[in-house]
Image: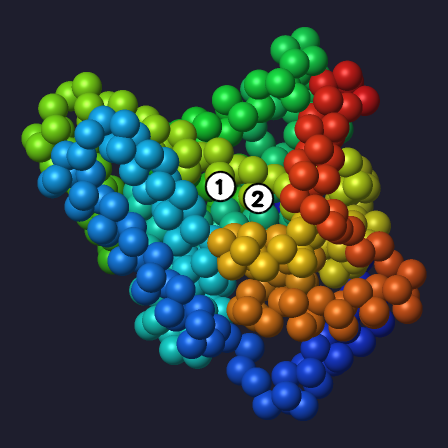
């Protein structure tokens, strides 16, 4: 299979881009992050380092240490959502080096920004919800996330065990899939960019640093069993949080899973309309959640304008919603987090019934 092509851009997309451009011109705003985002980034990174140092060097009581490991996982996820994700998209700051630095935070957390940029910026953002291309929809054979994927009997229970699969995602990512991408030079069917000597050194250097920070030092300081339990609790918390937040935007009942025409390899819609049919917002009025997930609950805005910082999404969502209404194009959203979660479970249940 080759990556499919989209239909020619519609007037909807050009009109929407113009309206968003006019909004930033009229308000005299930059499209990148602002002071409150930078403050949040520093706060999250300091909280992460403080939690790590407390756990490793001050060996708190085991019950407190377990809570600390969950907190460390939650902080790793929020740094991913708020700092790394924006940095890798180039929307964190006007300054390129600041974006690079924000993006590199993923390397300290054990993954690799070079692989992420292909997996997320190129593959997921271009080919959202297209089976066999969008890597975010690939949890085969454990989960059936798209109607096009092969049904196995175990999927009948996937709406009950999906959190178990998600819990392993982060550990599998940093210890298996990153290396698979490196070795095959591909993310699924899409080739990664040619790696420079610096990229290779960065890949191995950061992987080694991660092993030193999260395996060697804690093993030396704490011993095998406390390290293993702590590291698993940390990895499981991170995996569940990352998976749930990303899946609630795409793997829900209302989202489409378009496939290209077999002969032409072309999709029915243009890129922008495709994004609107495959992406859903959730709980956008929940200010605490929006702060924590870095605008990933405004996924419609993010998928249409990934180069605009999430701090602007609440404002531009009004323009996008209005434009969709005028053009009769769906704008998918769940007002509450619980509704999005229920829709995700229903989606898994439906596909588990071979629907
Ligand atoms: Zn993104």
Is the CB of mark 2 within 8 Å of ligand 1? no
Q: Within 10 Å of the Cα at label 2, are there few (<14), some (14-19), or many (20+) other Cα atoms?
A: some
Q: Nearer the viewer, residue 180 or 195?
A: 180
Tell whether 215 sits left or right of 183.
left
Q: Nearer the viewer, residue 265 or 303?
A: 303
Q: Which residue occupies 76% across, 72% down?
A: 319
Q: Within 10 Å of the Cα at label 1, are there few (<14), some (14-19), or many (20+) other Cα atoms?
A: many
Q: Is residue 39 visible?
A: yes
* Residue at the disc numbered 2: 246
Q: Are marks 1 and 2 in contact (CB under 8 Å)?
A: yes
Q: Is residue 217 above or below residue 348?
A: below
Q: Which residue occupies 90% across, 68% down?
A: 326
Q: Nearer the viewer, residue 316 or 54?
A: 54
Q: Position of residue 112 (x, y in %)?
A: 35, 47
* Residue at the disc numbered 1: 242
Q: Quadrant of residue 213?
A: top left
């Amino acid at each position: 299979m080759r990556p499919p092509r989209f239909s020619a851009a519609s007037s909807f997309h050009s009109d929407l881009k113009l309206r968003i451009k006019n909004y930033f011109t009229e308000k005299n705003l930059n499209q990148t992050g602002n002071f409150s985002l930078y403050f949040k980034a520093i706060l999250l990174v300091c909280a992460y380092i403080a939690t790590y140092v407390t756990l490793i060097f001050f060996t708190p009581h085991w019950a407190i240490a377990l809570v600390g490991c969950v907190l460390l996982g939650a902080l790793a996820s929020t740094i991913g959502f708020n700092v790394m994700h924006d940095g890798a998209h180039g929307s964190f700051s006007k300054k390129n080096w600041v974006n690079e630095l924000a993006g590199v935070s993923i390397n300290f957390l054990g993954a690799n920004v070079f692989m992420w940029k292909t997996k997320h910026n190129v593959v997921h953002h271009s080919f959202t919800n297209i089976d066999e291309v969008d890597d975010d929809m690939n949890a085969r054979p454990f989960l059936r996330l798209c109607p096009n994927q092969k049904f196995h009997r175990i999927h009948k229970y996937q709406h009950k065990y999906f959190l178990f699969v998600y819990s392993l995602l982060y550990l599998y990512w940093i210890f298996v899939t990153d290396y698979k991408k490196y070795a095959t030079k591909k993310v699924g069917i899409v080739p990664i960019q040619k790696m420079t000597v610096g990229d290779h050194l960065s890949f191995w250097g950061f992987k080694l640093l991660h092993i030193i920070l999260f395996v060697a030092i804690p093993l030396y300081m704490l011993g095998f069993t406390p390290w293993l339990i702590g590291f698993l609790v940390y990895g499981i918390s991170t995996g569940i949080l990352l998976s749930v937040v990303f899946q609630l935007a795409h793997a829900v009942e209302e989202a489409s899973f378009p496939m290209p025409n077999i002969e032409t390899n072309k999709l029915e819609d243009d890129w922008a309309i495709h994004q609107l049919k495959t992406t859903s917002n959730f709980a956008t009025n929940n200010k605490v959640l929006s702060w924590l997930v870095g605008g990933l609950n405004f996924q419609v805005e993010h998928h249409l304008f990934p180069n605009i910082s999430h701090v602007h999404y609440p404002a531009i969502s009004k323009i996008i919603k209005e434009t969709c209404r005028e053009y009769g194009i769906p704008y998918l959203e769940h007002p509450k987090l619980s509704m999005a979660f229920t829709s995700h479970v229903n989606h898994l249940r439906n596909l588990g019934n071979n629907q």
